[in-house]
Amino acid sequence: MALGKDYVQQQCSIARALEVVGERWTLLVVRDAFYGVRRYSDFLSHLGAPRAVLAARLQALVDVGVLDRRRYQDAPPRDEYVLTDRGLALWPVLRALGAWGRDELPGTTPMRHFHHIVCGTELATNGECPACGVPVPPADVEMRPGAGLDPDPADPVARALLRPRRLLVPLDPEATP
Amino acid sequence: MALGKDYVQQQCSIARALEVVGERWTLLVVRDAFYGVRRYSDFLSHLGAPRAVLAARLQALVDVGVLDRRRYQDAPPRDEYVLTDRGLALWPVLRALGAWGRDELPGTTPMRHFHHIVCGTELATNGECPACGVPVPPADVEMRPGAGLDPDPADPVARALLRPRRLLVPLDPEATP
DNA sequence: TGGGTCGGTTCGGTCAATGAACCAGCACTC
DNA sequence: GAGTGCTGGTTCATTGACCGAACCGACCCA
């Protein structure tokens, strides 16, 4: 976002955070990373962002330590982008934003539901499991499709995300039935 | 943010939320509203945003029902911008962003601390009071300055925010000692 | 009559986002 | 080994958003 070229807003940790993740597309990239998207082409087809912007955002997120770029195949060389611990810590931000969009914006049918994988209970808006009474880390969250989702999207990544999935598990769009 | 002119990302409530509050300056305006800022000139001096951008953001936030514009004086006519219930519901988003910025970005000393006004306990990162075990609404939160704040800022709004204050209480920069 | 404040709007310049085209490295097929 | 396709980008011209400064109208006060 580059709020003021050199941190005009350094007085506030919210402003500091927005400097890093407040730019257009950035939080949607992180969201997709939670959903299991790891490869450049998958981010591209699911987000619909311009290629140059996506490349710049991925590089910026790697630079600040939210994503880690790692080689997963050597011939041909292919890298994937995986959330670091710092990136995983953004989960409450995405939860809060999603809950606000769902509850406060008119005409929104729930898109996705999040359940505690060990007991199946749907998470509360604060990210805790009402049954177990504990905050649930993203690795223990199962995402289930809601009524608001397009049942037959053109994009193969979106189609793969229609089935219930555990967060952070790598996506394989080829495996779509 | 106008992600794609007409909701390319409508499949996701996070994207819906970012359409509304994801633009530059928007969440900082909302943050200042929680801190008690209500008047155009106070937002202006505290944020340092261009006047045209601030006017556009305030109007947009009124249009989507996050802020309410209300007349508080007739001669001369003056309006103030106050958070609606929909705006108050953004509190968890700001909490989450601020906690992430404070905990995950290097070289950040805590700027502000948030305490439960009925018991004085500092709030946990999930926005609950550890002593009372309940989620604390913003009206029951007291903000106290932290070590990272500039002790003598030039801006009178920033100076007024140096003292412990309850959230949402209207700011009066004139009353600064 | 003049000056000051508040809450904007208007205006050029600049910077970032967009979409399309292009390209390099590699694998596969013929 | 030439052609074709996929992946992961970069380059480029155009569009749009943001920026800072100036301007402006309504109102108050001396």
Image (spheres, coloured by chain):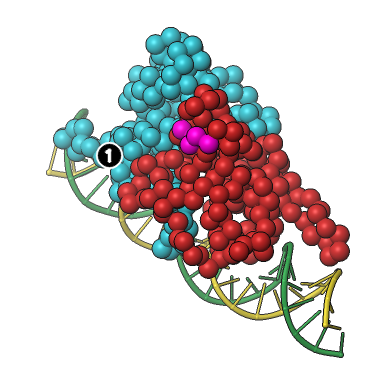
Chain colours: A cyan, B red, C green, D yellow
Residue A172 in sight: no
- Mark 1 belongs to chain: A
- Whether residue A76 is in magenta: the answer is no
Q: Quadrant of residue B175?
A: bottom right
Residue wearing tag 1: A68
- On screen, residue A51 above or below A135: below
Question: Residue B165 versus residue A80: which sits nearer the camera?
Answer: B165
The image position of residue B146, as x and y in percent, is 45, 50
The image position of residue A18, as x and y in percent, is 46, 49
**Magenta segment, principal secondary structure?**
loop
Q: Give, as a three-letter code, the residue at label 1.
A: Asp
- On screen, residue A51 above or below B55: above
Q: Residue at x 61, y 44 (%)?
A: B167
Q: Tell me how many marks there are.
A: 1
Question: Residue D1 versus residue C5: which sits nearer the camera?
Answer: C5
Magenta residues span B120-124
The image position of residue D30, as x and y in percent, is 83, 82
Residue B84 in sight: yes
The image position of residue B121, as x and y in percent, is 50, 34
Q: Residue at x 62, y 62 (%)?
A: B176
Describe the element under mark 1 as helix, strand or loop.
Answer: strand
Q: Quadrant of residue A164?
A: top left
Q: Residue at x 55, y 60 (%)?
A: B158
